[in-house]
Image (tube, rainbow, N blue to C red):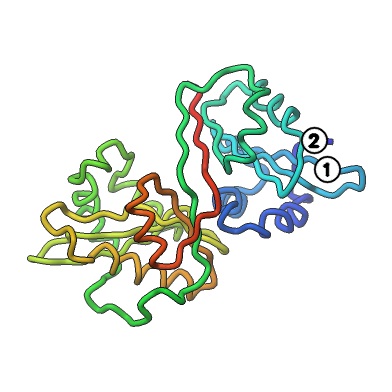
Amino acid sequence: MIRQLTQADDPAVQQLIRQKPAENLFIIGDVEAFGYEEDFQTLWGEFDDDGKLQAVLLKYEENFIPFSLGAFDAKGFATIMNSSESFTFLSGLKEIVSQIEPYLTVQPTSKREFYYAKCTHSELLVKRVDDEVKKVTLEEIPQLVDLLTSIPEFHNSQTTIENKKRNMEKGVSRSYYFEEDGKMVSTASTTAENSLSAMIVGVATDAHYKRKGYATRCLNQLCLDILAEGKELCLFYDNPEAGKIYKRLGFEDIGFWSMNTFK
């Protein structure tokens, strides 16, 4: 049986999604931030014959994210999506999303897949405070945005001073940087931070300062701090060379993340 979830279902939801904190980073964060009563967010759950929750489907604005630890009613979840008036994105672990796709009545206009990796330990990190790696303050956000927007692979991102400030103030994002010649030249950030996990994003270096290990140092310090708080780290990547760097720091591939766009 599939039905819409309410606050009364939260203990069952938490029991399910917290078994995989990194894999459920977005669902955990959205439930913590917005709960079950907001107009822009809805959750459905599938229950077995004994009334145990076995799968959830989150709709945040126009984006659907499903999760289950095992078999689930993929056709039932697809029926919910097909009947939605605002359905633009379907994203999630590939093995879950791929079960829903055959039942959708529309085809995606674009499909992307990324390696999904997580880190739960600091054994491979350099365990020392790097005094040259600094944490970005609210006042330094314009410099951070200038650095990111100067780098080709970030030209199509939606990064702005306003959303960076908002996310930092909410505590769902933090950024570190390395400075040389009096300017910010390398950085690494988190996004979608919640009580159990955080996603690494925005790992970048000015083209004139590459191959000096600055991004790795920023990432190392960021990972140390997040892991010390008892959180799991995760990230997407599609460049195998970048993947080698992440794996040297202790990240392990846990599957693929699918991003399907329908408009």
Residue 223: percent from left, percent from top = 41, 68
Going by the image, does 98 lie left or right of 226? right
Q: Quick check: marks 1 and 2 in contact, CB under 8 Å?
A: yes
Against 81, residue 57 (above or below) is below
Describe residue 10's horizontal placement relative to residue 118 as left or right.
Answer: right
From this viewpoint, which residue is outermost toward the bottom? 128
Q: Which amino acid type is shown beneath numbered disc 2? A: Ile
Q: In the picture, residue 230 is in which quadrant?
A: bottom right
**Residue at x 31% of width, y 55% of height:** 203
Q: Earlier in the sequence, mark 1 or mark 2?
A: 2
* For residue 52, above or below residue 220: above
Give the camera-side residue of 198 and 4: 198
Pick out the residue farthest to the top: 105
Decide: is 87 above or below 155: above
Camera-side residue of 9 and 162: 9
Quarter of image, res 187: bottom left
| Numbered disc 1: secondary structure | strand
Q: For mark 1, what is the residue?
A: 47
Q: Position of residue 246 (x, y in %)?
A: 39, 60
Looking at the rendered structure, which numbered label has been put on residue 2? 2
